Image: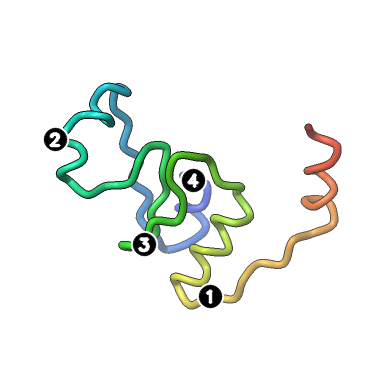
Amino acid sequence: MPRLGKIYDIEIKVTTKPKAEYTSDEYFELNLPVAPAVMVGDDIVVEGTDIKDEKLETIICEHLGLPVPVQSKKRFLGHFFNK
């Protein structure tokens, strides 16, 4: 995510806490998503799981009103060969 913050005019805020804090009553009272999670603006993009970089980049572009990046062949094929 920090890489995307350098590419796009968007603030990236990473919050890490011990797992016990994410399951506390105080955390649930904050109405934040279940970790791991990604929010773009006030929208929860994903919670309780990871998200692929390409999907997150697309959502950020949509949020900023920018054209959605086109996935290159090299990037696409990398998913098959870098498993």
- State how far apart marks 3 and 1 are (Cα): 17 Å
Q: Nearer the viewer, mark 3 or mark 1?
A: 3
- State how far apart marks 3 and 4 are (Cα): 16 Å
Q: Are marks 3 and 4 in contact (CB under 8 Å)?
A: no
- State how far apart marks 3 and 2 are (Cα): 21 Å
> What is the secondary structure assignment of the residue under circle 3?
strand
Place residue 64 in its image quadrant. bottom left
Residue toward you, 59 or 4: 59
- State how far apart marks 1 and 2 are (Cα): 37 Å
Q: Is residue 23 left or right of residue 72?
A: left
Q: What residue is shown with label 2?
A: 26
Query: Residue 56, position in %: x, y?
Result: 54, 55
| Amino acid type shown at disc 2 | Glu
| Mark found first going from the N terminus, 3 or 1 | 3
| Mark found first going from the N terminus, 1 or 4 | 4
| Mark found first going from the N terminus, 1 or 2 | 2
Query: Residue 70, position in %: x, y?
Result: 72, 67
Residue 29 lies, with reference to residue 72, above or below; the image says above
